[in-house]
């Protein structure tokens, strides 16, 4: 799905201007990855026309198995060169050259003692997204990992403390995003492709999601220390499926519930965008997080 959220800040409150979604064009996926930028650009233009979205500056999210987002504790003496520390950590984990990566970082010691949050995304992936939105007649203000957008929506609506350890699970049509939150900081996040081929889609969704979560459980439990995961917040089109919520609750031993990414956003439930949110709110979590990020940048 292609999703868009437009927010504005007024008198100290965040107001919803527009929310929109449309189906992804057929044939734009190759081995689970988006490749047909021209068709996607046409769909973005059509969505903006259909929903009367006049905004020209977009915030965009990227995801996939090559995107890394996590917090690591810097050793004593590294405070003067956190960028160097981050680049060294990235070099150890990347499956591609460091020169081909977009690296970002920020200290998060307020939430995780002595830690720095860092992200890495392939340059070619960022360039592809920017070029695609440019073909739609828009400008990419910034591009961020899906996990960061998800975390931004959660943090804005929940105002968590450093004692809260929450697992965010975004269930997309082809990709699952896990983001372990310590307060408002991402301790560990990964994207996993769960529908790569037609045979994958024949396996029940609940089983695919459980297998993906279980493959990361050792890292999630390790990164949560000295705490345990206290709750899960689900987003994406399948977030409200009771069977999935129950299966995740049983597997992790903590409650799994659908997230409300517009909990602190003002809007009219009777408006077209309001009705769309009532029906598809969890599906728009990443788009809401991107819109909130754009507000912070403006």
Image: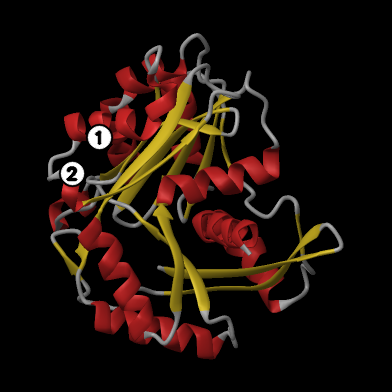
Q: Nearer the viewer, residue 295 or 40?
A: 295
Q: Nearer the viewer, residue 63 or 274?
A: 63
Position of the N terminus, as image quadrant, is bottom left
Q: CA distance from mark 1 to mark 2?
A: 7 Å
Q: Is residue 228 above or below residue 275?
A: above
Q: Locate residue 298: give its quadrant.
A: bottom right
From the image, tell me which residue sits under label 1: 90
The answer to whether 28 appears left or right of 112 in the picture is: left
- The residue drawn where x is 57% and y is 21% is 230
- Looking at the image, tell me whether mark 1 or mark 2 is earlier in sequence order: 1
- The residue drawn where x is 62% and y is 51% is 261
Q: Residue furthest front?
A: 80
Question: x, y (%) of residue 73?
Answer: 41, 19
Mark count: 2
Q: Is residue 286 above or below residue 10?
A: above
Q: Locate residue 80: give its quadrant.
A: top left
- The residue drawn where x is 43% and y is 45% is 147
């Amino acid at each position: 799905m292609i999703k868009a959220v437009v927010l504005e800040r007024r008198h100290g409150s965040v107001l919803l201007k527009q929310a929109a979604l449309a189906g992804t064009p057929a044939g734009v996926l190759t081995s689970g990855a988006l490749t047909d930028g021209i068709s996607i650009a046409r769909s973005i233009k059509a969505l903006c026309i259909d929903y009367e979205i006049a905004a020209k500056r977009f915030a965009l999210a990227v995801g996939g198995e090559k995107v890394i987002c996590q917090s690591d504790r810097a050793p004593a003496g590294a405070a003067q060169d956190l960028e160097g520390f981050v680049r060294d950590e990235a070099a150890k984990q990347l499956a591609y050259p460091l020169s081909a990566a977009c690296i970002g970082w920020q200290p998060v010691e307020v939430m995780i003692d002595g830690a720095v949050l860092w992200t890495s995304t392939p340059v070619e992936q960022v360039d592809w997204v920017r070029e695609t939105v440019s073909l739609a007649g828009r400008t990419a203000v910034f591009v961020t990992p899906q996990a960061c957008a998800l975390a931004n929506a959660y943090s804005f609506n929940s105002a968590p403390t450093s004692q809260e350890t929450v697992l965010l699970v975004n269930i997309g049509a082809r990709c699952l995003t896990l983001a372990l939150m310590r307060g408002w900081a991402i301790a560990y996040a990964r994207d996993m492709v769960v529908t790569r081929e037609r045979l994958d889609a024949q396996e029940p969704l609940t089983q695919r999601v459980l297998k993906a979560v279980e493959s990361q459980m050792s890292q999630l439990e390790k990164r949560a220390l000295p705490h345990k995961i206290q709750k899960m917040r689900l987003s994406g089109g399948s977030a409200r499926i009771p069977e999935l919520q129950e299966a995740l609750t049983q597997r992790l031993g903590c409650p799994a519930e659908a997230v409300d990414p517009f909990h602190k956003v003002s809007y009219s439930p009777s408006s077209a965008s309001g009705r769309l949110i009532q029906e598809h709110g969890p599906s728009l979590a990443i788009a809401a997080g991107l819109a909130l990020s754009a507000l912070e940048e403006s």
